Image (cartoon, rainbow, N blue to C red):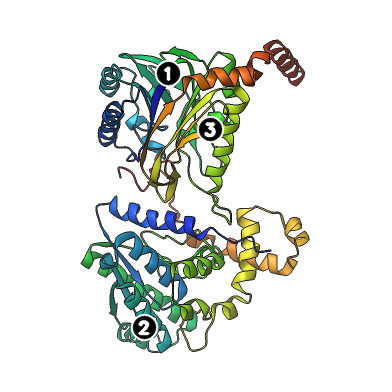
Amino acid sequence: MDFTVALAQIKPKLGCLDDNMALIEAAIEKGIAAGADLVVFPELALTGYFLKDLVPEVALRLDAPQIEKLKLLSRQISIAIGLVEVSSDFRFFNSAIYLEQGEIRHVHRKVYLPTYGLFDEQRYLARGDRFRAFDTRFGRVGILICEDMWHLSAPYILAMDGAMTLICLSSSPGRGVSGSEGLGSAAAWQKLTSTTAMFLNCRVFYCNRVGYEDGINFWGGSEAIAPSGEVTDRGALLDEDFVVAKVDGGALRRERIFSPMMRDENLAITVKELKRIDRENNR
Amino acid sequence: MGALTVNTALLRQILVGFVRDEVTKVGLKKGVLGLSGGIDSALVAYIAAEALGPENVYAYTMPYRTSNPESEAHAKLIADQLGINYQVLEITPMVDAYFDLVPAADNMRRGNKMARERMTILYDHSAEVGGLVLGTSNKTELLLGYGTLHGDMASALNPIGDIYKTQVWELSEAMGVPNEVIAKKPSADLWAGQTDEDDLGFSYRDADELLYRMVDQRMSREELIAAGFEPQFIDTVHRKVQGSHFKRRLPVIAKVSNRTIDRDFRYARDWGK
């Protein structure tokens, strides 16, 4: 099935739920007007990224009015969006929710919380404990949040769980200006998204934010990647953008005929060997 | 060597975007800076003019009676070329009035006093015009501690604090800073004939090659020696970095409560922006 995805490369304001909600609603309206079937937002789109002690102050329960509003809008367009989620036992998660036809279809809680270099997520946030694919009107989908994608096992698990579309929500800081043409962090991501698509014969939608927080820039460059690894659409570097990408549904079928790696992937061997490694590590 | 080459177009885009974003998000549109006639403040003026528009940039040259007249001439050249707001404010009366009270002060104390005098003037003008003070210290100076705490190191935003002097030269060339400003020997201009490199005892280019490997690439002492750096040079630079670390931190607060500022009361400066 052909469909259209919009990647909302927005610039959230740090800790300002109301302002960001307005930004998000405007982008959703824009997606609807552009005829998009799905709109993807960045990681922590509702709150901004370097929240530190603001985490509990901007966290939302899944029955919050903002999410009710998004549910309503998802009757017109499917939505993938990032926020801080608070659970009933007061743990705070860096979460992404997928809304469709008026319901939350899936919640992914970020598993790999980067806590090194300029990152400090584990200080403030609780860690998710699963990767699960889920069904949507575009087929089976898997969601990753930023750092999750840098762990090979995460997209692998989602693909083995049947996902043929991987959505990655990101707040990736730009760094590594060198003599080469691109930004270091952008170049690394571009290799990763394309290679992941190629390895797993999946399409990848990558949405990264822009703007600055305390001098740290977010570089944007959101992408739609075909299952061949080819980037079909890419957003502006370092500037707000709204990427509307036509997705050729047939490309997935053709790629899976041409390069049937996922057909041949042997889950039994993988599980057997991982179990052996686990056993040996625990000896 | 030569690991410090940068993509100047990309660097320019990030730094210009930084000044524009961080000034406008606090509800302002103007930037204020001290224009010494040297390359660092020249580069910041070019970045600010591109980010905010020349009409929103306010530059001040604040000479002391021993300052080299060439510095003021270069500052004026830069201001004219950019079409930014420009004013000369001499600090001799205030500085001399103070040193009449403490005549025994040495060159370092005099230099620090001048730097802090200039800082108070910039902050006063930032209140007058309603703009943020833009910092002009580069990464080399900041790491070596070659600057005056609460003087030239004071600012609201610093677009060039993460780029080395070598990269300041590269970007300045790309952005059209006049050649005479790029080519001259860097100087704090506190007395006639002073140069940074004489003060430091080594060249900025050598220091940058070392600092880049030591700080950015985290190479060990053994790896640095294997890469061709003299052990004595490595130790001198390392000592300067460590010894000046206090200048790069906020004042230390004695902890007694459960939530101490910056320790366990942590918010981004752009909180709510």
A16 over B84 or under it: above or below: above
Q: Earlier in the sequence, mark 1 or mark 3?
A: 1
Name the residue located 42 percent from the left edge and 32 percent from the top edge.
A43
Q: What is the distance, in whole Å, between disc 2 and disc 1 at their CAs?
A: 62 Å
Q: Secondary structure at mark 3?
A: helix
* Amino acid marked by disc 3: Glu
- Point out the frontmost of discs 2 and 3: 3
Question: B109 or A152: nearer the eye?
Answer: A152
Residues at discs 1 and 3 in contact (Cβ within 8 Å): no
Q: Amino acid at mark 1?
A: Val
Residue A6 position in % (x across, y down): 37, 30
Q: Which residue is mark 3?
A: A147
Q: Quadrant of residue A257?
A: top right
| Chain letter for the residue marked with disc 1 in the picture | A
Position of residue A30 measured from the top left corner of the image (x, y, whole percent): 28, 31
Q: Which residue is mark 1?
A: A107
